[in-house]
């Protein structure tokens, strides 16, 4: 289980089980079987011309449980992928460490975790869970960059029987560790698919996006992302059509779609180059940041930085979600993850403020103060510590209290809000102080982002992409 190059002896594919063969065939375009041990098969081949290493646990051998030899094969697969700078895909269907091999199997599983950590931030590591993955076979996927779950995927530290004996809870495998649990509640799964074939196909798409990050977009794309944004700032909307109008057609994959839903994270191509996108979604909690989005966006930014993916932030955020619940959930600790990740990132970082950016969320969502290379704003975008109306409700509380007539009070609020915006400057002041670089038309967004990105040097962070 070392980082030494493997002997590349091609084996006969007929020696592995039909389950492993079928799964490996569906991931690769063309491949050779390099390792076949008790419980794990390793293939090396190409996906869309990208050299890729894939290992698959074998559910027909003791339920895919991991023994010393199987763990050694996974270590070798991960290390050789790391040495060759190739994506590594793991197909997981395993009951965890083999009981019959005792503590030696636990030691072997620990070596798998060490190999995955060595490769973290150096190569894309993608896990596809197509059956139960318990114990060590659960933490294996959790240590990788992207976890994809098919409909039969079940990921948990201990199964329902142990849970019942220890805690008395009556729970089934699906509720304990199924796709819904990890796709919407825990955030363990980045992608949930309706079929196993779609899970394997998603792994292929990600390997292509991450393995070949620079390409071309031959299609002439003329879009207006502003057409998807309501003119009334009080109206919500789905931000995904806006993102799709900016990125190359058909190039995008959304991660964590159903978890921490007020922020959207996508991987796609912009002018042929793979980028990561973070956007507020006004149809969910008005696009507010909260504790969960701190976890989601913080890790995504760190991962993009380690993979060398430039970051595009599309901002329409009223602030952080207030309340006792948020403080109890650690919004400060968890929200700081995004601040830390963005400020420490080295990849090119571009931001577009579409409608509004207020308060601390203005800072967190790709501000110049945190290190953005360029910040653009659409005409009429509102930028301030808080909305002008809310600000005067605080600053002019006594004056407003004296006005008892509702219509007169509303007129006073409007006048004071206009005065406040003129004084603090809003977008005008943001341009003057350099917090915003330029106001651009929505229809110019895609072209300006491509142009700006092409002018920036290619940079990449060196931090491992560990769990956060």
Image (cartoon, helix red, strand yellow):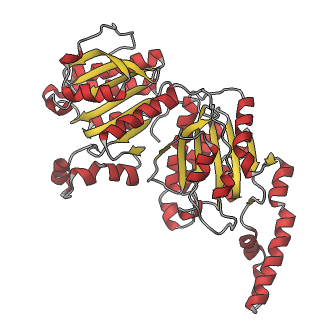
Quarter assignment of residue 200: top left
Tell how many labels. 0
Residue 146 rendering spot, x and y as whole percentages: 43, 37
> Where is 397 relative to 408, above or below?
above
Toward the left, the furthest residue is 100
Of residues 159 and 276, the one nearer the viewer is 276
Of residues 268 and 78, the one nearer the viewer is 268
Can see residue 306?
yes
Can see residue 106?
no
Residue in view at x 18 percent, y 58 percent: 168
Residue in view at x 30 percent, y 20 percent: 42
Residue 84 rendering spot, x and y as whole percentages: 46, 15
> Where is 393 relative to 127, above or below?
below
Q: Quadrant of the N terminus?
A: top left
Residue 364 rendering spot, x and y as whole percentages: 64, 50
Of residues 298 and 77, the one nearer the viewer is 77
Horizontal arrangement in the rendering, residue 269 relative to residue 468 (left or right): right
Residue 260 rendering spot, x and y as whole percentages: 48, 54
> Where is 357 relative to 46, above or below?
below
């Amino acid at each position: 289980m070392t980082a030494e190059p493997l002997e590349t002896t091609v084996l006969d594919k007929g020696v592995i089980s039909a389950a492993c063969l079928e799964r490996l065939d569906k991931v690769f375009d063309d491949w050779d079987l390099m390792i076949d041990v008790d419980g794990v098969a390793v293939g090396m081949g190409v996906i869309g011309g990208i050299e890729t290493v894939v290992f698959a646990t074998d559910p027909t051998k003791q339920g895919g449980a991991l023994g010393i030899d199987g763990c050694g094969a996974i270590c070798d697969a991960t290390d050789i992928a790391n040495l060759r700078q190739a994506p590594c895909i793991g197909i997981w269907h395993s009951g965890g460490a083999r009981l019959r091999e005792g503590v030696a199997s636990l030691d072997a599983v620990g070596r798998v975790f060490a190999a995955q950590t060595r490769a973290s931030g150096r190569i894309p590591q993608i896990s596809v869970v197509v059956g139960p993955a318990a114990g060590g076979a659960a933490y294996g996927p959790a240590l990788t960059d992207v976890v994809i779950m098919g409909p039969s995927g079940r990921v948990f530290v201990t199964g329902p029987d142990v849970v019942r004996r220890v805690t008395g809870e009556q729970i089934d495998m699906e509720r304990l560790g199924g796709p819904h649990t990890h796709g919407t509640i825990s955030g363990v799964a980045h992608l949930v698919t309706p079929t196993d074939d779609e899970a394997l196909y998603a792994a292929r798409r990600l390997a292509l996006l991450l393995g070949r990050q620079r390409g071309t977009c031959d299609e002439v794309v003329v879009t207006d992302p502003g057409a998807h944004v309501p003119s009334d700032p009080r109206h919500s909307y789905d931000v995904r059509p806006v993102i799709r109008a900016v990125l190359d057609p058909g190039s995008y994959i959304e991660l964590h779609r159903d978890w921490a839903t007020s922020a959207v994270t996508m991987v796609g191509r912009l002018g042929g180059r793979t980028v990561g996108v973070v956007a507020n979604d006004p149809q969910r909690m008005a696009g507010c940041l909260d504790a969960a989005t701190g976890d989601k966006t913080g890790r995504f930014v760190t991962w993009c930085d380690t993979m060398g993916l430039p970051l595009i932030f599309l901002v329409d955020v009223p602030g952080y979600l207030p309340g006792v619940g948020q403080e109890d959930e650690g919004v400060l600790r968890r929200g700081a993850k995004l601040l830390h990740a963005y400020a420490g990132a080295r990849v090119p970082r571009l931001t577009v403020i579409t409608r509004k950016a207020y308060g601390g969320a203005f800072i967190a969502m790709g501000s110049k103060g945190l290190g953005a290379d360029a910040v653009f704003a659409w005409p009429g975008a509102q930028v301030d510590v808080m909305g002008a109306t809310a600000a005067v409700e605080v600053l002019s509380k006594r004056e407003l209290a004296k006005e008892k007539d509702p219509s007169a009070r509303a007129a006073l609020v409007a006048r004071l809000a206009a005065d406040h915006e003129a004084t603090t400057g809003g977008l005008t002041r943001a341009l003057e102080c350099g917090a915003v670089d330029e106001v651009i038309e929505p229809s110019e967004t895609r072209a300006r982002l491509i142009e700006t990105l092409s002018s920036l040097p290619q940079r990449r962070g060196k931090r491992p992409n560990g769990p956060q």
